[in-house]
Image (cartoon, rainbow, N blue to C red):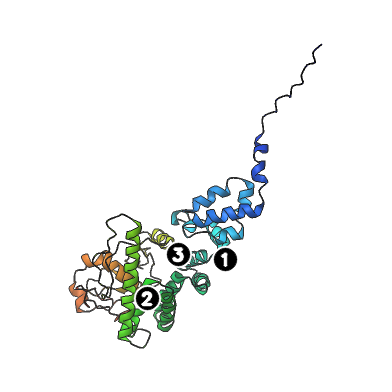
Amino acid sequence: MRKKQKTTPPSPPRTNAEESDLFDDLPDDLVVFILCKVSSSASSPSDLISILITCKRLNRLGVHPLVLSKASPKALAVRAKKWSESAHRFLRLCVNSGNIEASYTLGMIRFYCLQNRGSGASLMAKAAIKTHAPALYSLAVIQFNGSGGSKNDKNLKAGVALCARAAFLGHVDALRELGHCLQDGYGVRQNVSEGRRLLVQANTRELASVLRARSASPDPSLNGSGCGLLSDFGCDVVEPETHPVNTFLKEWFGSGCDGSGLRMCSHVGCGRPETRPHEFRRCSVCGAVNYCSRGCQALDWKLRHKMECVPMERWLEGNNGGDNGGVGVGGGDGGGEEEGELN
């Protein structure tokens, strides 16, 4: 009599809980390492948020200090129209985790948008101490303009010192600003030859960035044409990518007037507003634009204003408005073009 062979009963289908065991078995250190890579390469805040809402474990590890410290500028690019206490809290967490970019971003938002001048300047200083060039330059602009205070609060020497540090780190706008200060004796002993050298160096760095962009992109518009290395204003370049915090400022202040008569910097990539009436310098030729800094003036001249600047009689006769009067930036030094001076 033949024995019946024993058959193994089919295994029951795996449940969702069992299928997730592979992820659950991963050590936290490995998950944090992966999240750091995602955080540093995120192209928007939603990239991080989509991870945080996936499961409780990722929600917990996604706010690990190491992950937040690696968050990229684009991952911190909160939109003004979506600003909320939760967004504020997220940036604070990143700051407390040692994220230098978050210190700069939240510092700019607090200083200009929330009008918490002391806290905002302190956060920017925290980033500047860690050699964050944009933070150094922004603090220099605040010192040059006396932002957040009165005209008497301007500290030109401090502005020059901060500009020099940012220029040393390769910040083109700071390099150009420092060159004009030396050339005009603004906040520093006048040294025309050294100022000219720094302006040429700024133009060279700018041209190099254009050439790198052209080699990396087949876009024919990236041609760096119209470049005058000896010009005060540098090469005719395509508009550089706007920093996320400058985009936030532009959205926050909208049309550039909040009803108080305060103006925004006319360079479309800036977004900085005045903190008191007549804080920014105005073009003495047309009187239609105003700038927070020489860097913004030079870039806006190349991108837009040189096509629009038309002399106005009332500005040529003299302008008594503006508390930054008498700071000229005359052009026409070999480049064949002249930029309107700032009053």
- The residue tagged 2 is 175
10 Å crowding of disc 2: few (<14), some (14-19), many (20+): many
The answer to whether 42 is drawn above or below residue 204 in the figure is above
Question: What is the quadrant of residue 95 in the picture?
Answer: bottom right
The answer to whether 15 is drawn above or below residue 134 in the figure is above
> Residue type at mark 3?
Cys
The percent coordinates of residue 37 (x first, y second) are 54, 55
Q: Secondary structure at mark 1?
A: loop
Mark with earlier residue (1, 3):
1
Mark with earlier residue (3, 2):
3
- The residue tagged 1 is 98
In the displayed orientation, state which residue is furthest to the front. 1
Q: Nearer the viewer, mark 1 or mark 3?
A: 1
The percent coordinates of residue 90 (x first, y second) are 55, 58
Task: Using the image as rendered, state which of residue 272 and residue 34 is in the foreground.
Answer: 34
> Residue type at mark 1?
Gly
Between the C-alphas of marks 2 and 1, the distance is 27 Å
Quadrant position of the C terminus in the picture: bottom left
Q: Secondary structure at mark 3?
A: helix
Q: Is residue 142 visible?
A: no
